[in-house]
């Protein structure tokens, strides 16, 4: 439990060292932020790490993070990557924290993956003293307890999720657990601890996380850029009320992300002109994104996943069709153009920014017309793995929520990986050097997307690569298109671990995809 005597008669505005001292051994901490340093309360996380390295405390922590957090360089969850500091980590996405991932791989701590949307929604259940979240999300995937239950190693034996039947249908029950410390970030705090987020590009799940901690008898630490006089904040911009906040730490050097100091077009303060002249390099990513973008249709509500699929937004901008659809990002951005790379959670010129959990309510209910997601492995049945392969622990982020519930899913990726080299010119594709590893394999190492579940829902599913396009059929993968210039046997069938069903209407991919000039798909929409 938290030693609340340390907070009595203490101003809510305190040094980061004082705030770090509020965390005790064996606490369960929930860090509310996203990868790439977005909304990351880095000063507080760093202070907790320094305290452990100096004093050996706090130790045996449970760390939870809804979205993948970190920067791959020691930030985010990496602040906890020390033996003895944490005993359990529950997160949706792990690739931002390679050191922590290695500790899990080496069985030095417990590690679990739960779907991002479920974790965001679980905070509301914890805040409301409910037993947990009942959801269809995750059925048939590795988070289903009939598979791995989200566990990442032998040490991870906790029963976090159960299968249950309600009204004759199967559901997954994700269990609530108490939270001792929640760490959030905002832009401004007043002297009473009211928190606004006017410079943040997303709001995440800060409010239900704070409510959950307080109703569990825990505390909330908020990191902000600045402090305002008591009573001066417009109540309409307060995202977390001061009654929920115990400690405020000021970091005037706080940046919007690890790549951007502050871009007002991300936070909605201004609308900026898009740079339509800046196009993607003409490479594999662009070829795949171009073919995928041809699946866009007017007025579609669209989600873009992290990885190769995020290039669809760039193509939409180049082809001047971005205003024909509504792009969304799971962290809460609606409208505008999703940002790429480390700024992935953000968006330029958003129409609206809603809370993380509310976005997933919409997604889980089928609100998405179309989603573009990456893939690492696909088998003949159409099962997809993005979460764990070889020695890599990646996790899923919002992948399971999105892939199970969008009306149509377009998986995007290269045909093979590691050292693949191709050349596109004059409307044709040439394979210069094949990748070392096959991505269309006999068996996926972990099921992140269950094709049987998709077929039962009559979900439309495509797999787009630089040289071939497949669809999900009742009997397995159907080869529908091949790139002009490639050989069906030598470049496709011989490079797969299984033989797909070949469509009797097999055709060439559009040659415009393989030319540097614009495709001109604006008129077709």
Image (cartoon, rainbow, N blue to C red):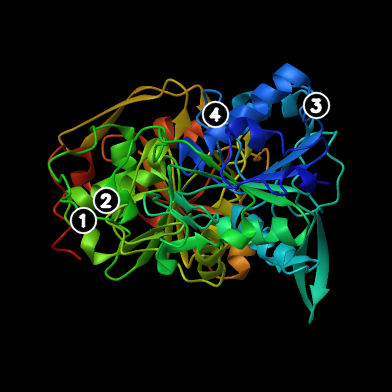
Q: In the drawing, what numbered circle is on residue 271?
A: 1
Going by the image, does 503 lie left or right of 28?
A: left
Q: In the drawing, what numbered circle is on residue 491?
A: none
> As rendered, which of 261 and 391 lies closer to the eye?
261
Element type at mark 4: loop
For marks 4 and 3, give the one nearer the viewer.
4
Q: Tell me the residue that label 2 is attached to.
A: 265
Pick whichever of labels 2 and 4 is earlier in the sequence: 4
Image spot of residue 133 (x, y percent) = 73, 66
Pick whichever of labels 2 and 1 is earlier in the sequence: 2
Rendered position, 34 above or below 355: above
For label 2, the crowd category at 10 Å Cα-Cα, with few meaning under 14, some 14 to 19 and many 20 or more, is: some
Residue lying at 50% horizontally and 21% vertically, measured from the top left: 436
For label 3, the crowd category at 10 Å Cα-Cα, with few meaning under 14, some 14 to 19 and many 20 or more, is: some
Q: Tell me the residue that label 3 is attached to.
A: 107
Image spot of residue 302 (x, y percent) = 38, 61
Circles 1 and 3, Cβ within 8 Å, touching? The answer is no
> As rendered, which of 469 and 305 lies closer to the eye?
305
Q: Tell me the residue that label 4 is attached to.
A: 75
Circles 2 and 1, Cβ within 8 Å, touching? The answer is yes
Using the numbered discs, state the Cα–Cα distance from disc 1 to disc 3 in whole angstroms. 48 Å
Report the residue that reaches farthest toward the top: 54
Residue lying at 51% horizontally and 71% vertically, measured from the top left: 366
Using the numbered discs, state the Cα–Cα distance from disc 3 to disc 2 in whole angstroms. 43 Å
Pick whichever of labels 4 and 3 is earlier in the sequence: 4
> As rendered, which of 32 and 452 lies closer to the eye?
32
């Amino acid at each position: 439990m938290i030693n609340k005597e340390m907070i009595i008669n203490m101003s809510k505005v305190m040094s980061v060292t004082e705030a770090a001292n509020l965390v005790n051994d064996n606490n369960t901490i929930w860090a509310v932020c996203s990868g790439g340093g977005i909304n990351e309360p880095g000063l507080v996380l760093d202070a907790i790490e320094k305290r452990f390295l100096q004093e050996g405390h706090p130790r045996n922590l449970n760390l939870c993070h809804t979205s993948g957090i970190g920067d791959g360089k020691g930030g985010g969850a990496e602040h906890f990557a020390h033996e003895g500091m944490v005993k359990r980590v529950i997160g949706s996405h792990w690739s931002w924290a390679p050191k922590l991932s290695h500790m899990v791989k080496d069985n030095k701590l417990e590690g679990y993956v739960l779907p991002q949307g479920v974790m965001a929604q679980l905070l509301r259940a914890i805040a409301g003293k409910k037993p947990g979240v009942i959801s269809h999300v995750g059925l048939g995937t590795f988070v289903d307890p009939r598979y791995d239950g989200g566990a990442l190693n032998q040490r991870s034996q906790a029963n976090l999720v159960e299968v249950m039947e309600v009204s004759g249908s199967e559901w997954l029950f994700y269990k609530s657990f108490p939270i001792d410390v929640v760490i959030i970030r905002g832009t401004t705090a007043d002297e009473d601890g009211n928190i606004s987020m006017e410079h943040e590009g997303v709001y995440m799940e800060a409010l239900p996380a704070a409510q959950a901690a307080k109703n569990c008898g825990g505390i909330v630490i908020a990191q902000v850029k600045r402090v305002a006089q008591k009573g001066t904040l417009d109540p309409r911009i307060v995202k977390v009320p001061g009654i929920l906040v115990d400690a405020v730490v000021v970091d005037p050097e706080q940046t919007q992300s690890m790549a951007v100091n502050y871009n007002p077009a991300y936070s909605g303060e201004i609308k900026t002109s898009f740079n339509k002249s800046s196009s993607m390099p003409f490479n594999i990513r662009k070829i795949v994104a171009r073919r995928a973008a041809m699946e866009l249709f007017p007025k579609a509500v669209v989600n873009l996943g992290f990885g190769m699929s995020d290039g669809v937004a760039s193509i939409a901008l180049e082809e001047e069709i971005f205003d024909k659809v509504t792009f969304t990002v799971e962290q809460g951005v609606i409208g505008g153009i999703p940002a790429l790379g480390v700024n992935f959670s953000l968006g330029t010129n958003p129409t609206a920014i809603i809370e993380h959990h509310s976005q997933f309510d919409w997604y889980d209910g089928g609100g998405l017309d179309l989603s573009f997601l990456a893939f690492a492995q696909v088998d003949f049945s159409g099962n997809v793995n993005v979460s764990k392969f070889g020695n890599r622990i990646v996790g899923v982020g919002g992948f399971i929520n999105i892939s199970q519930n969008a009306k149509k899913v377009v998986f995007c990726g290269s045909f093979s990986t590691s050292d693949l080299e191709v050349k596109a010119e004059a409307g044709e594709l040439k394979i210069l050097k094949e990748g070392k590893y096959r991505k269309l394999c006999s068996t996926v190492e972990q099921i992140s997307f269950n094709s049987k579940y998709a077929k039962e829902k009559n979900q439309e599913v495509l797999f787009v690569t630089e040289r071939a396009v497949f669809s999900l059929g009742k009997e397995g993968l159907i080869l529908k298109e091949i790139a002009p210039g490639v050989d069906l046997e030598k470049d496709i069938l011989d490079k797969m671990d299984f033989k797909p069903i070949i469509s009797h209407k097999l055709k060439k991919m559009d040659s415009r995809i393989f030319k540097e000039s614009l495709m001109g798909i604006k008129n077709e929409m």
